Structures are given as C-alpha cells and as structure tokens.
Image (cartoon, rainbow, N blue to C red):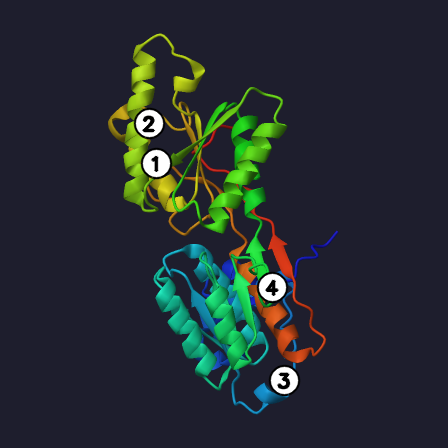
C-alpha cells in the first residue's frame, strides 16, 4: 500500500540532498536555482509525489498584512530538536504564504520572556511558537494579554492556567524504547545519565525506562547518574569514571550485582551520549558495545562525531513543527478552535554503540 505520510518540502529536500530553502526557491523563485539542482529537485518531487499545498486563508486581522509572520522562540539553537522544529514550521508557513522569524533564548528564562514579549508587541506577528523546557506560564500570560495565540513545543500546557495547544515528542516512549532495546540485546544493569531532572522531557524519559524495566521478565536494574551538566565534557567525565569501574571489576573476581558498573546506558541528550562513548573508550579500558551499550535520545546532527556511531531514539522534530504550524493556522482561522495536546512518537535508529 502507498504511504499515508504527507510529503512535505523537507522530505523533498532530504531526498534531493539540498536545503529546504533551495526547494522553496525552486518552487517560488526558480531563477535563483541552478539547472543542475532544478533537475535533482524535479526528480525528487516526481518520485515522492509531492504536491504543494494550496495556501489557506488567514484571519481578517492577518489578511491585511502583506506577509503574515509567525514568531518562534527556541530555548537553545544548539539543540537540534529546536532547529528541526523550525524547519517544519517554515515549510508549512511557506506553503501558506507566511514567514517565520526564529529567535534563540540561549537557555535563559528571562531572555525567553523578553523575546515572547517582543513578538507579542509586533503587529505583523499573527502567532507565537514557543519551544521551551522551562515553565511557560509567564509567556502564556504575555501572549494572552496581547491577544495572540501561542503554541508550546516540547512542553505541556501548565495545569490550571489559560489553556493553550502543545505539541511534544512522546518522551515516555523515548525512554521506554531505549530501555527495551538495551534489554533486548542482553543488557541487565541499566543507567540513565542526565542532568536538569526538573525538565519535563528528562522526567518523562526516565519514567519510560522505569516502565520498560518493570515490564521486563529479565532481572534488570536501573540507576540514575547525575552528569552535572549537559555538555560533551560532562559525558566524558562520567564515561572515564565508569571505564575505571569496569577495569576494576575485570581485574577482580566479581562483586555484588549492585556494585557492578552499568552495561547499558541511556543518555538524557546526545552530547552527553557522545561524551560517554569517548570517555568509556579513552585508554582502552572499556569497549562499546562489548562492555557497555550507549543510546542517545535526540538524533542530533552531531550523532556520528567521535569514535562510535551513536544509536539514538530519534525525535520527530520536523513533524512537530509541521503539526504545530497546522494547529496555529486552525487557531488563527477557526473561531471554534479547541485547544489540545499532541504527542508524536520517536523512532529507534540503530548504529554501532549498541549490540545487535
């Protein structure tokens, strides 16, 4: 049966090996695209069966604008999930005669509030997208006071507050998939390495791992290791410490199960996971995946950096952006719009950091 997945600009771009902007130029400003790239894009469009979506009407308030704008505030531009979300938002905007302006809060909550306030004050902005891992109550209040719709990405709408729409990765499923993969491939001493446990996504990933362990018929343990940070260097420090523990365990007989180092690790983020693979194998004290399997939880664009291609649970970033923007269009155009939350499932991408 043919796929029911809606083909978008980003799918064409990936298939043709070009950027979304190049595909957009091909569709809207063909004079800006070389004949070679035109041929590649045309072939991809034909093969995928892509049909540009007909522009939807915008609200009366927005229709008077030459180009209605969407403001997008992301927590940190270095996090690939937020940039993938941006691609999805941009794709739907361009298909509907709109444009998106993206800004970076640098993981600073005060700066995040300032950027939301800036978009709320801009008359050309028809709606605000907020990708946040922190409490969005103040941001919702700012948008509500300005009469502008706001949609949360990667965070649920706070309970008891003004209801808003949200689109998220199913992070419980993310943790569950990762743990199930480790258990299925023979790991029995699992560890979740992360920081910022007050973040909703981190809590949910750990919950998913707990579910997988409780449902397993095997004798599996699960521990938490606080990495103290989210950077590659933080993962390297933890990895070196665990490599020493493996070397010590190998040089003795064997200790109690509770004293043994983990043989399967899920990292709260891919930078941590990459650092872990580097630290674990530094000095040849530990092998991946022979002694330890490592899984990341994002599928960032850096996942192949280092000495071991990283198995990941891939976040549906572009799909989140598409869904959020379609929801925004409905909220702008539909007087009977009903707020709701959407969870999109991640997928497993197997590479060399886990056992077969």
Q: Earlier in the sequence, mark 3 or mark 1?
A: 3
Q: Secondary structure at mark 3?
A: loop
In this view of the protein, which residue sits in the foreground, 26 or 103? 103
For disc 1, the marked residue is 276
Q: Earlier in the sequence, mark 2 or mark 4?
A: 2
Q: CA distance from mark 2 to mark 4?
A: 40 Å
In this view of the protein, which residue sits in the foreground, 76 or 348? 76
Mark 3 in CB contact with mark 1 (< 8 angstroms): no
User: Is residue 266 in view?
Assistant: yes
**Horizontal side of residue 336 vs 293, given as left or right:** right
- Single out the residue that lies furthest toward the front: 160
Q: CA distance from mark 4 to mark 1?
A: 33 Å
Residue at left offset 66%, top offset 79%: 333
In this view of the protein, which residue sits in the foreground, 206 or 141? 141
Q: Mark 3 vs mark 1: give the one in front.
A: 3
For disc 3, the marked residue is 59
Q: CA distance from mark 2 to mark 3?
A: 57 Å
For disc 2, the marked residue is 242
Q: Residues within 10 Å of mark 4 (few under 14, many from 20)?
A: many
Q: Mark 2 vs mark 4: give the one in front.
A: 2
User: Is residue 281 in view?
Assistant: no
Q: Residues within 10 Å of mark 2 (few under 14, many from 20)?
A: many
Mark 2 in CB contact with mark 1 (< 8 angstroms): yes
For disc 4, the marked residue is 323
Which percent across, then down, holds residue 354?
46, 31
Q: CA distance from mark 3 to mark 4?
A: 19 Å
**Horizontal side of residue 89 vs 48, given as left or right:** left
Which percent across, then down, holds residue 229?
32, 45
Q: Mark 2 vs mark 1: give the one in front.
A: 2
Q: Earlier in the sequence, mark 4 or mark 1?
A: 1
Q: Earlier in the sequence, mark 2 or mark 1?
A: 2
Which percent across, then down, holds residue 52?
62, 73
């Amino acid at each position: 049966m043919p796929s029911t997945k809606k083909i978008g600009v980003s799918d064409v771009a990936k298939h043709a090996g070009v950027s979304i902007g190049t595909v957009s130029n091909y569709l809207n400003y063909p004079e800006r695209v070389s004949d070679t790239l035109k041929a590649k894009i045309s072939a991809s469009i034909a093969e995928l069966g892509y049909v540009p979506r007909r522009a939807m009407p915008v609200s009366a308030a927005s229709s008077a604008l030459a180009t209605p704008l969407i403001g997008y505030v992301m927590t940190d531009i270095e996090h690939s999930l937020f940039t993938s979300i941006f691609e999805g938002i941009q794709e739907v905007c361009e298909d509907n005669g709109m444009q998106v302006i993206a800004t970076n809060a640098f993981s600073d909550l005060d700066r995040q509030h300032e950027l939301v306030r800036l978009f709320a004050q801009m008359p050309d902005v028809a709606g605000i997208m907020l990708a946040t891992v922190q409490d969005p109550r103040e941001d919702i209040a700012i948008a509500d006071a300005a009469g502008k719709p706001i949609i949360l990405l990667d965070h649920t709408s706070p309970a008891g507050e003004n209801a808003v729409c949200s689109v998220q990765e199913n992070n419980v499923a993310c943790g569950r998939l990762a743990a199930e993969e480790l258990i299925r491939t023979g790991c029995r001493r699992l560890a979740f390495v992360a920081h910022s446990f007050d973040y909703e996504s981190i809590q949910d990933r750990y919950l998913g791992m707990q579910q997988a362990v409780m449902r397993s018929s095997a004798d599996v343990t699960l521990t938490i290791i606080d990495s103290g940070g989210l950077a590659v260097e933080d993962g390297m420090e933890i990895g070196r410490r665990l490599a020493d523990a493996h070397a010590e365990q190998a040089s003795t007989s064997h200790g109690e199960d509770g004293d043994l180092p983990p043989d399967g690790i899920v990292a709260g983020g891919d930078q941590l996971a990459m650092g872990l693979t580097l630290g674990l194998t530094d000095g040849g004290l530990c092998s991946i995946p022979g002694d330890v399997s490592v899984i990341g939880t994002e599928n960032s664009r850096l996942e192949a950096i280092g000495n071991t291609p990283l198995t990941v649970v891939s976040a549906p970033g572009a799909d989140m952006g598409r869904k959020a923007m379609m929801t925004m269009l409905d909220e702008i155009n539909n007087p009977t719009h009903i707020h709701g939350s959407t969870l999109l499932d991640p997928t497993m991408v197997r590479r060399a950091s886990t056992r077969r």
